[in-house]
Amino acid sequence: MFIMEAINALLHRVSCGKLTEPAPSLAAREAIFSAALRAADHGNLRPWRFLVIEGAARASLGKVFSAAALADDSDLNEAQLERYQKMPTRAPLLVVAIAQTSQHPKVPQIEQVVAAGAAVQNMLNAAFALGVGAYWRTGPMAYHPSVMKDLGLVEGESVVGFLYLGSPEGKLKPLPELAVADYFEAWPV
């Protein structure tokens, strides 16, 4: 039964872009966060760390975003600045996924970043299986030097995404029909 439930969740997972209160319960968070730590990870380097942002900290992150945007474009109007300010409030809980890469004789840095991305995917899958709405976003703020500095990133670290978590608001988008044969082929051709 468990195998069928796991496969069913993987085959039907969809992101949920509209999220509202409440945030995931403590038990759901523990399961979602634990799933991240089971991601494929060459060399068991655990090349990741995560910042959990909720409550008033979301508004603080919004100020970081709007300051970064204003530094890039001093002509932004109030509405544009407010859009940046509100980005972190799209959900009651936000997880910043950070890849921590290091020089390793057998594990290239790109594999370390991919492992951090796999950790985010595991959290998305776990959230869906638990009925928690989740959405993985990046965008310019994920790569902005002042945002990375304000989040406390150091050399060798990069943001691989902002994972928004909350309760789904409305219906989930229907899944697109994808044909496996369109993406998988025998080799050599």
Image: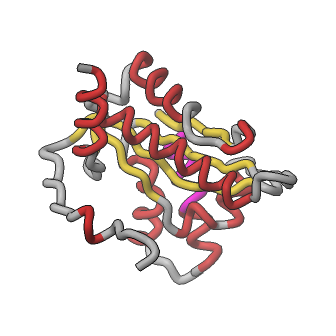
Q: Residue at x 56, y 70 (%)?
A: 69
In the rendered image, the quadrant that contains the C terminus is: bottom left
* Camera sees residue 21: no
- Residue 58 location, x and y as percent? 50, 43
Residue 118 located left or right of residue 131: right
Quarter of the image for residue 79 reads bottom left
Q: Residue at x 25, y 45 (%)?
A: 11
Position above or below: 37 against 115: above
For the N terminus, the image quarter is top left
Q: Position of residue 144 (x, y in %)?
A: 64, 67
Left or right: where 10 falls relative to 85: left
Q: Is residue 18 visible?
A: yes
Residue 103 in picture, x, y percent from top left: 86, 54
- Extreme top residue here? 27
Picture residue at 69% right of the left edge, 52% below the top: 112
Taking the image as shown, residue 176 lies to the left or right of residue 105, namely: left
Q: Is residue 4 above or below residue 86?
A: above
Point out the stretch of residues depicted in magenta: 57-65
Q: Nearer the viewer, residue 147 or 95?
A: 95
